[in-house]
């Protein structure tokens, strides 16, 4: 089975081909430098760039993999959540291909695809706890299979990635700012009393990073010397040396390190709470083994924030403490990409789950429905 993945949910335009769980090739174009001029993604510009880039990326993918359009069995497309205009570009392209080639159509939940992305390089055992941390979402899921996701906790307002990016903007660091905060923070020890670990004084599994974002902005406003007088070159290698002369590099590094710590620790506390509360067989009772493994087979951490080194280290410590394997995507699979869309689409197709050409895009803020149709034959499938 050859599956084409199409990703246009935000500011990354990507197409990829997966065959029998193996990545054949991927073409990706990022719009980060373009949107960095505005300090964040401009939806209208993003959708126009997708429209401009998608056809040429698809042609380049076919050429690099020596796969013909007629050989594609399934077209898998990110149908949400995301920017509506951007999603519609990818969805329209996918439907056109299906009409032209007879391939089956599968709409993919972009969030679920992130959690399955590590499956391209390693086996994911089930049931596992999945933490998705990205620019738009911070969610906890129980995964009982590649097609069975139970939402345990969700973002109430700002996600972890939003806190990184808006904090970077307060310091006058380029968008996307998370990578700058990550690297600059390696140059100092965190002040663990500087910023709060947000929304932990409760017993739920939801996330809210708006208060942390405000705390950083307030601190920088009261210490204006921390704000860079000039925006660094977003394409330059990230290090303390990108900070211009006259800036207290250690003070900036300490702020970044403290933010890294606050976000990583918040994710750890909620993840450990989920491990304790839901480590039971589906439909069963709580295992009551605080600090134990329960029936969990693994901990999966994915999304753009999963590329952060402090987050990865903190989650590795948690997994080791609980005796669980930690499954992380490679850094290139943490950000939005089409490989994960194709891989997730293949899993759905093999389970007999497809969509009709009336498939709708789902904008951010709405739940993506589980509205798959019954099994459809893919006559050209090789597996």
Image: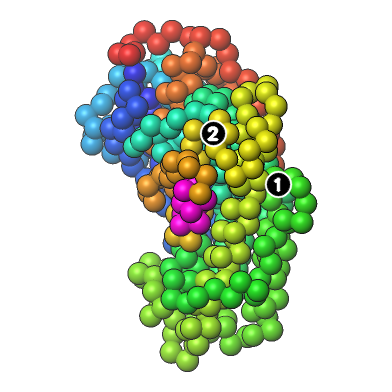
Q: Nearer the viewer, residue 146 or 324?
A: 324
Q: Dot 1 surroundings within 10 Å: few (below 14), some, or many (20 or more)?
A: some
Residue 91's tag is none
In front here: 283 or 44? 283
Q: Position of residue 313 (x, y in %)?
A: 46, 57
Q: Which of 223/381 is in front?
A: 223
Disc 1 secondary structure class: loop
Q: Which residue is mark 2?
A: 296
The reply to whether the magenta stretch includes residue 318 is: yes
Q: Residue at left 43%, top 89%?
A: 245
Most common SS among magenta residues: helix
Q: Quadrant of the N terminus?
A: top left
How is the rendered protein coloured?
Answer: rainbow
Q: Which residue is mark 1?
A: 206
- Total of numbered circles in the picture? 2
Q: Which residues are magenta?
A: 311-320
Residue at figure coordinates x 65%, y 74% from the top left? 193
């Amino acid at each position: 089975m050859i599956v084409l993945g199409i990703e246009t949910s935000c500011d990354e335009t990507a197409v990829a081909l997966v065959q029998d769980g193996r990545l054949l090739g991927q073409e990706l174009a990022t719009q980060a430098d373009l949107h960095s001029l505005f300090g964040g993604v401009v939806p209208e510009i993003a959708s126009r760039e997708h429209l401009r880039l998608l056809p040429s990326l698809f042609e380049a993918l076919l050429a690099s993999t020596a796969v013909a359009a007629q050989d594609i069995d399934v077209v898998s497309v990110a149908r949400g959540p995301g920017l509506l205009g951007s999603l519609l570009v990818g969805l329209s392209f996918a439907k056109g291909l299906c009409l032209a080639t007879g391939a089956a159509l599968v709409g993919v939940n972009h969030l679920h695809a992130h959690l399955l992305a590590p499956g391209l390089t390693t086996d994911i055992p089930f049931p596992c706890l999945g933490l998705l941390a990205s620019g738009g979402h911070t969610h906890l899921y129980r995964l009982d299979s590649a097609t069975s996701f139970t939402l345990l906790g969700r973002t109430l307002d700002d996600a972890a990635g939003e806190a990184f990016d808006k904090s970077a903007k307060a310091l006058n660091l380029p968008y996307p700012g998370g990578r700058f905060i990550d690297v600059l923070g390696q140059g100092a020890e965190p002040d663990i009393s500087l910023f709060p670990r947000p929304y932990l004084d409760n017993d739920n599994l939801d996330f809210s990073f708006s208060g942390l974002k405000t705390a950083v902005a307030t601190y920088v406003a009261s210490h204006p010397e921390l704000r860079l007088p000039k925006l660094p070159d977003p394409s330059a290698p990230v290090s303390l040396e990108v900070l211009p002369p006259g800036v207290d590099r250690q003070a900036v590094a300490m702020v970044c390190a403290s933010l890294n710590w606050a976000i990583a620790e918040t994710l750890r506390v909620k993840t450990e709470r989920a491990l304790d509360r839901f480590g039971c067989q589906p439909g069963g009772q709580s295992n009551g083994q605080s600090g134990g493994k329960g029936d969990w087979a693994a901990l999966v951490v994915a999304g753009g924030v999963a590329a952060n080194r402090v987050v990865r280290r903190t989650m590795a410590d948690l997994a080791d403490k609980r005796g669980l394997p930690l499954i992380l995507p490679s850094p290139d699979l943490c950000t939005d990409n089409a490989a994960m869309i194709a891989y997730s689409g293949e899993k759905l197709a093999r389970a007999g789950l497809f969509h009709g050409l009336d498939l709708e895009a789902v904008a951010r803020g709405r739940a993506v429905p589980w509205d798959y149709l019954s099994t459809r034959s893919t006559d050209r499938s090789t597996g």
